Amino acid sequence: MKGLSLTGLVLLAISILLFYLTTNGFTAKEIGLPHIMGIMGGIGIGLIIGGMVGYISKGSAMKAEQKKKEFKQLQKDKVELEKKAAEIAKRETEIQSQQNQNPQI
């Protein structure tokens, strides 16, 4: 968002600079329909570009959130698998100890 605002301010400064370089002695009394149309066009283009950038950044944020959720789920699954593996290992050691205590002839 900061980058978008900075880009907007830079473009605004460039447009003001170009306007004053191309007009001689322009005053506020001379503002007419072409100037208003230009301002409205600039606002429209800014809104279109801002909407596209917002849509892209929201999509990126949603993908990152989805990856975080998947990672947390994988961590939970890992903990569960480790518990199951520990239980299985414990059972095996119990079975082996029982077999060692009661050898079959």
Image (cartoon, rainbow, N blue to C red):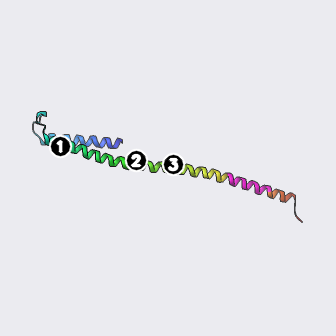
Residue 82 drawn in magenta: no
Given the image, on which type of amino acid does mark 3 rest?
Lys
Q: Which residue is mark 2?
A: 58
* 95 left or right, relative to 75: right
Of 80 and 33, the residue lying toward us: 33
Q: Nearer the viewer, mark 3 or mark 1?
A: 1
Q: Nearer the viewer, mark 1 or mark 2?
A: 1
| Magenta span of residues | 83-94
Q: CA distance from mark 1 to mark 2?
A: 31 Å
Q: Which residue is mark 1?
A: 37
How would you classify the magenta stretch by its main secondary structure? helix
Going from N to C along the chain, the mark reached first, 3 or 2, is: 2
Q: CA distance from mark 3 to mark 2?
A: 15 Å
**Crowd class of label 1 (few under 14; some 14 to 19; many from 20; radius 10 Å):** few
Going from N to C along the chain, the mark reached first, 3 or 1, is: 1
* 72 left or right, relative to 53: right
Q: Residue at x 69, y 55 (%)?
A: 85
Q: Which residue is mark 3?
A: 68
Residue 90 drawn in magenta: yes
Q: Residue 70 location in percent, x, y?
A: 53, 51
